[in-house]
Amino acid sequence: MTECKLCPHHCNIAEGKSGLCLARTNVSGNIVCTAYGRLTAAALDPIEKKPLYHFFPGSKIFSIGSYGCNMRCPFCQNYDISTNKDIDTEKVTPEQVVNIAISLIPRGNIGIAFTYNEMLTNYEFVVETSRLARDKNLKTVIVTNGMITEEYLKPLLPLTDAMNIDLKCFSESGYRKLGGDLQTVLETIRLGAASCHVEVTTLIVPGFSDDEETMRGISKFIAEINKDIPLHITRYFPHYKYDSPPTDISVMRRLATIASEKLTFVHLGNI
Ligand code: SF4
């Protein structure tokens, strides 16, 4: 058995097996990122789609994703790539990604976004690609659930220009239901905001994160770091194992009003 220390799960992985995220495997006693450079999706997206509304607005960013995730949200909006390691992929090198990103500059591209699945489980690829991107003056963006240990996050932050970090609820018990750890995510937001541009996203899921107390906790926590950190309140639609109807728009608006009591920038998404 070998322990992976990338995220708070600290999986003890048997020889030849993968950890919970499916992206990291024990190969001869070493934890190897078997998802390394294996892309499931690549697109030139508007930066607002990450979502980042206050980081080079109006620009585009070359967005890539792989497979695997270290949480198990029953309402996952991308479960086809987050839970399937046998999905078709295209193997690329960091150099190839950077070269494509450079070729897209004439179309408005500012850099590379690691997104779609939980790309921090593809850590080594993200670090190496970000380092090369920095050398070429490309911006780097990470869209993440924030589930990464400080030991791994700290070396990555100097290579990162912006992050969008999910804050899915504001209780340990809620995070446990999703296979996550609240304190780790809060620390990722704190450390990220001290180092680069950060925006936070909360998906409003009926019966899980649509109550006023949750929004008061989230907005107070963010405001204590910096009230100018933007918060995206996004609307849930039925996906994966969750079939509740989409979040009521009046609930979204009420939660946005509550968040606006503490925060300068509150954006509703998916409505
Ligand atoms: S990154 Fe993956 S393998 Fe490593 S501890 Fe987290 S879930 Fe387990």
Image: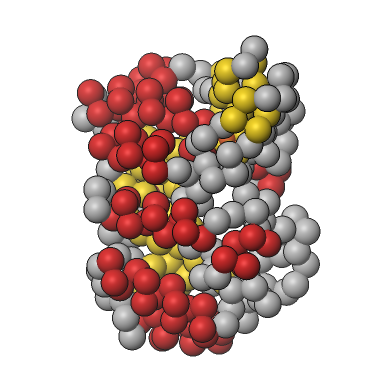
Residue 181 on image: x %, y %: 55, 56
Q: Residue furthest front?
A: 1
Please identify the quadrant where the C terminus is shown. bottom right
* Residue 130 visible in this rendered orientation of the protein: yes
Whether residue 14 sits left or right of residue 204 in the image: it is: right
Residue 166 on image: x %, y %: 48, 58
Instruction: Residue at 68%, 77% (x, y): give it.
Output: 207
Q: Residue furthest top?
A: 28
Q: How many marks?
A: 0
* Residue 66 visible in this rendered orientation of the protein: no
Please identify the quadrant where the N terminus is shown. top right
Instruction: Residue at 34%, 69% (x, y): give it.
Output: 222
Residue 18 sits in quarter? top right
Residue 204 on image: x %, y %: 57, 71
Above or below, 82 relative to 191: above
Instruction: Residue at 52%, 22% (x, y): give it.
Output: 37
Q: Nearer the viewer, residue 244 or 189?
A: 189
Q: Nearer the viewer, residue 116 or 158?
A: 158
Q: Nearer the viewer, residue 150 or 237?
A: 150
Q: Colour scheme in the image? A: secondary structure
Residue 107 on image: x %, y %: 33, 36
Quadrant of the displayed image that contains ligand 1 = top right
Q: Nearer the viewer, residue 251 or 170?
A: 170
Residue 14 sits in quarter? top right
Whether residue 174 sits left or right of residue 93 in the image: it is: right
Instruction: Residue at 54%, 45% (x, y): give it.
Output: 8
